[in-house]
Image: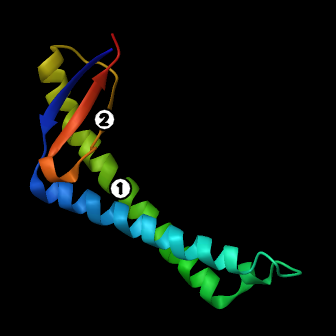
Amino acid sequence: MKTFTLEISKETCDTLQRCAYEVMTRQGVVARMIEDSKDAVDASVLDSVPFKHYHGLLEDAVRSYDTEKHKLEESLKPRVLEHEGKDVAFQWAVNDFSIHEALITVED
């Protein structure tokens, strides 16, 4: 395996960070609602209007985050191809939104 970094725009980092934060926030609310009803005798919380509302917000946040991750991956493909000189499978991660870099891992 080989790793290297590629610079990504501040705007892209900010968008990814915002989307990740929204997903984490929504997950926390949904998890808390389930946790608060753990002693209930039925699963009525899952049918409640507030739960359905926040679960829908979570689904929207996950979709937005997935869309932004896909956009980034598509923008990285030609740059990885240029860096490697051939089409290769790769994984990427943004471990620190403040440095505006994607860590690229290429299989040997």
Give the mark toward the camera: 2 or 1.
2
Of residues 103 and 68, the one drawn nearer to the viewer in this rendering: 103
Q: Which residue is mark 2?
A: 92
Q: Secondary structure at mark 2?
A: strand
Of residues 104 and 33, the one drawn nearer to the viewer in this rendering: 33
Task: Tell me if 59 is positioned left or right of 78 in this view.
Answer: right
Question: In the picture, residue 87 is in which quadrant?
Answer: top left
Residue at far right of view: 41
Residue 15 visible to an observer of this rendering: yes
Which x, y percent locates residue 95?
28, 44
Q: Secondary structure at mark 1?
A: helix
Q: Residue at x 19, y 54 (%)?
A: 13
Q: Residue at x 45, y 62 (%)?
A: 62
Question: In the picture, residue 107 is in which quadrant?
Answer: top left
Pointer 2: residues within 10 angstroms few (<14), some, or many (20+)? some
Per the model, the C-alpha gap separating discs 2 and 1 is 15 Å
* Circle number at residue 1: none
Compared with 35, 66 (above or below) is: above
Of mark 2 and mark 1, the one earlier in the sequence is 1
- Is mark 2 in CB contact (under 8 Å) with mark 1? no
Of residues 82 and 25, the one drawn nearer to the viewer in this rendering: 25
Please, what is the three-letter code of the amino acid marked with disc 1?
Thr
Task: Tell me if 56 is positioned left or right of 91 in this view.
Answer: right
Q: Residue at x 14, y 47 (%)?
A: 100
Q: Which residue is mark 1?
A: 67
Which x, y percent locates residue 61?
42, 68
Question: In the picture, residue 78 is in which quadrant?
Answer: top left
Pointer 1: residues within 10 angstroms few (<14), some, or many (20+)? some
User: Which quarter of the rendered picture does the N terminus lie within?
Assistant: top left
User: Which quarter of the rendered picture does the C terminus lie within?
Assistant: top left
Compared with 94, 26 (above or below) is: below
